[in-house]
Amino acid sequence: MKCGRDGNFSKGELQRFGNIELSPSSGVLNYGQGLFEGLKAYRKQDGNILLFRPEENAMRMQVGAERMCMPSPSVQQFVEAVKATVLANKRWIPPPGKGSLYIRPLLMGSGAVLGLAPAPEYTFLIYVSPVGNYFKEGIAPINLVVEHELHRATPGGTGGVKTIGNYAAVLKAQSAAKAKGYSDVLYLDCVHKRYLEEVSSCNIFVVKGNVISTPAIKGTILPGITRKSIIDVAQSQGFQVEERLVTVEELLDADEVFCTGTAVVVSPVGSITYLGKRVSYGEGGFGAVSQQLYSVLTQLQMGLIADKMNWTLELS
Ligand code: PMP
């Protein structure tokens, strides 16, 4: 789907996956005017397909587009486009329990612009791919390293939206961490270097007793849809959930730590390395809280338990 600065997107069409044509002076290539989303479709036992909260992705794209000076598709246009793309790719959705179809909506300034300014034309497209587990550890605990020098976001910047440049900013620290054998990087706030932000592509939760704490949304971390869902699930399971500033000391003193995201679902953290000191959690397995929340969320997403929250959208 394309539109000009007026934001009236044309009717979308299905196309075979392939290269797209883009001006060398397009806004996305020169000034990073690009935004994406990520969501998943699961196949149910009865063959129907479940999407998880697609309107949330649509609304997050709208907020991001506003920050990046781009028009965005309406919630209805977004959800209809996701549905059409998923149905056209039904055969690629893995059988129940064998993975999911990852859906990547992309919005970019595709029009040519030489001097710094918003692009005159925008393209919204969606591509999909079957996926299994995000981390090579599968659903086993991951090992994170806390980054002390590089930051992924600054107050007033674009850390709170899903713009492409945020991901370029984490590649250096992430590559260095992976080369040393870590699964990913945990970022701290850039002012005090003391408060937790998030991991390169997921949110973080710290468990102490019956209290589950997670960094509050304040513009520098992505408001994860899994994060929001896990907060509701945890409260419904009787946990006390706190969204606030969480210190690195609390992290090191936690009973359990886990990450949430569309790709990682709920991934338990086995160890954290901070300024060269490694702290391990649990017995090297799934902590009880992560296990419980993972189990409820994935059963909901796969249609194995009743969806009382009305979070799933069923397609056949
Ligand atoms: N933080 C970042 C930086 C991410 O890229 C993602 C993945 N979209 C998340 C958090 C988790 O968000 P969600 O649960 O919506 O996938």
Image: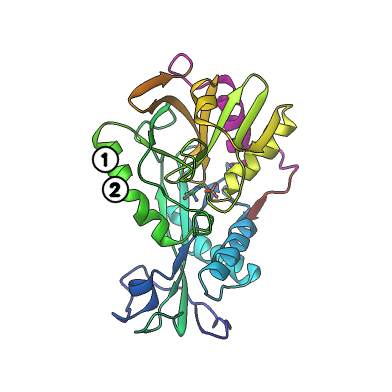
Local crowd at mark 1 within 10 Å, few (<14), some, or many (≥20)?
A: few
| Residue 67, numbered circle | none
Q: Amino acid at mark 2?
A: Lys
- Residue 169 location (% of width, % of height): 36, 54
- Locate residue 308, reporting x and y percent: 75, 42
* Residue pointed to by mark 1: 176
Are there few (<14), some (14-19), or many (20+) residues within 10 Å of tag 2?
few
Q: Which residue is mark 2?
A: 172
Dot 1 amino acid type: Ala
Label 2 vs label 1: CA separation? 6 Å
Residues marked 2 and 1 touching at CB (< 8 Å): yes
Q: Is residue 292 magenta?
A: yes
Q: Quadrant of residue 179?
A: top left
At x 58%, y 68%, the residue is 78
Does residue 273 lie above or below 245 as drawn? Answer: above
Residue drawn at point x = 74 percent, y = 26 percent: 238
Q: Quadrant of the C terminus?
A: bottom right
As helix, strand or loop, the secondary structure at mark 1 comes to helix
Position of 219 with respect to 231 (left or right) is left
> 23 and 168: which one is in front?
168
**Position of residue 161 in the picture relative to residue 276 (left or right):** right
Of 163 and 249, nearer the camera is 249
Q: Could you tell me residue 175's position as x and y percent?
A: 28, 43
**Horizontal and vertical percent position of residue 280:** 42, 19
The stretch in magenta equals: 282-308
Most extreme residue toward the left, as rendered?
179
Which quadrant of the view contains residue 211? top right
Which residue is painted at 60% across and 68% down in the image? Answer: 80
Magenta segment includes 266: no
Residue found farthest to the front: 192
Front-most of residues 146 and 73? 146
- What secondary structure is marked by label 2? helix
